[in-house]
Amino acid sequence: MMDPISSNAEKPRKYLELKPGRTNILGILRALSSHDYTEECKDFIESKDEIMAEHRWVVFASILAQKLLHYIDKPLSLLGSGLEMFLNILCNATNFHTFFFRGRGWWQVKRSASFVSINGVLDSRVDLDKKVEPGTKKYFASLSAMASKLAYENDHYIKNIVENTWKMEFLGSYSFWDERYKGDTTQAFLFRDSGTITVAFRGTEPFNAKDWMTDFDISWCKLPNLKGRVHCGFVKALGLLATDHNQDCPYATIAQLLRSNHATRLVVTGHSLGGALAVLFASGLVMHGEDELMERLEGVYTFGQPRVGDARFGEFMEERFRAWGVEYYRFVYNYDIVPRLPFDTNALMFKHFGRCIYINSLYEAKIVEEEPLKNYFDLWSMVSKRVDAMWEVVRSFLLPRMFGPDYKEGFVLLMFRMFGLLFPGLPDHGLQDYINSTRLSTY
């Protein structure tokens, strides 16, 4: 087995790296309009592979989106913090009493076991599905969906739910500092259920511009011992190309903890960006020759996961998963936009791989190679998307009557669904529909 601490410190021979921090909006526009744009953009687009003509507009759109997100980083963060605090105080008596009568500051409230993220406000469920048999694939899918939702919360909240509600062993919650963005950009927690350890990665936080910058980044690179190209932003978030795999490296920290827990099966999961990190964590085990961990890897379950690499990478990982008997399930709900990103075009070459479980707005599931509308935008679907969005609003009132009070949707979630009439792809990315899908669908 290769030493996971001794990573290849040099950059791959072929890569495309976008560096929006080295330019401004005017610099991007000037380079885009220049006849010799490769010379104009050499400071903020670093490449060891020729940027083909068909790449040009996509590359500049990506770096422009990242730059705009950088500008709104602090306002968006303040907006999100304020909104979450307001909703937590308004909807939770414990937080209201703590803030107004016990005189605790907002940061103390935010770090408490009663404070939930915006995802927890949209869907307050924390109980596991009691109707599925433990140890089955549907059980792991349902447990993974709930763990992916819980990954967005603070460590005190996570520990309380895992130990006191799920009655499982909490193994730790980890946040990792990213020097590029001066903040925690990767978070994961681990827990044990009988003989299985689950690793759940946090996804894109709605009010975290740094997470969105990673999602919009189309930089790519090649990893040692792996075939094909992979998304460089996700690779960096996981630390697979870190020159020093120390305690602040997500991959090394989690892999070391798993190695210390022998004879236990492993499940890796995540929603959105967390799903991408889950897949790349498994590829990191292959990359570093972690044969013992690959042998114990039961499955990878992702929800609303973006594309992480090209077709060659997908074919290579599918072969590796088959060789080790690893189950990979990629859940996609209806018109969720994130699984359709980055776009699958001849220029970008990003491709999904593995078994896709596609669920429509009636919670009917089918296994497909690729979800419908693979790049989301389609002239003929503009009407059908909004018809489905209206049905999802109506369905909010029907679900508790059909399936019980556990499916009751609150006012905040209803307003979020109304937003789907304008942009159907965003509400469909929410975890509430993925949790419903794992419970109500047959797959």
Image (cartoon, grey):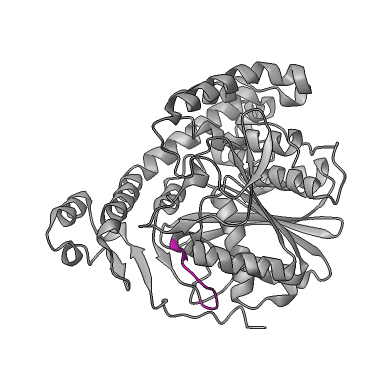
Measuring 67% from the left and 44% from the top, which residue is drawn there?
A: 150
Give the mark count. 0
Q: Magenta span has 184?
A: no
Residue 108 seen anywhere in this rendered image of the structure: yes
311 and 18: which one is in front?
Answer: 311
256 and 114: which one is in front?
Answer: 256
**In the displayed structure, does residue 407 sit left or right of residue 46?**
right
The image quadrant where one finds the N terminus is bottom right
The picture places residue 215, in percent across and down from the top left corner, at 45, 51
What secondary structure do most residues of the magenta stretch adopt?
Answer: loop
The image quadrant where one finds the C terminus is top right
The residue sitting at the left extreme is: 35
The picture places residue 26, in percent across and down from the top left corner, at 17, 50
Residue 322's place in the image compared with 373, above or below, is: below
Residue 160 seen anywhere in this rendered image of the structure: no
The picture places residue 112, in percent across and down from the top left corner, at 66, 41
Residue 153's place in the image compared with 417, above or below, is: below
The picture places residue 83, in percent across and down from the top left corner, at 50, 30
Measuring 59% from the left and 23% from the top, which residue is drawn there?
A: 392
Span shown in magenta:
224-232
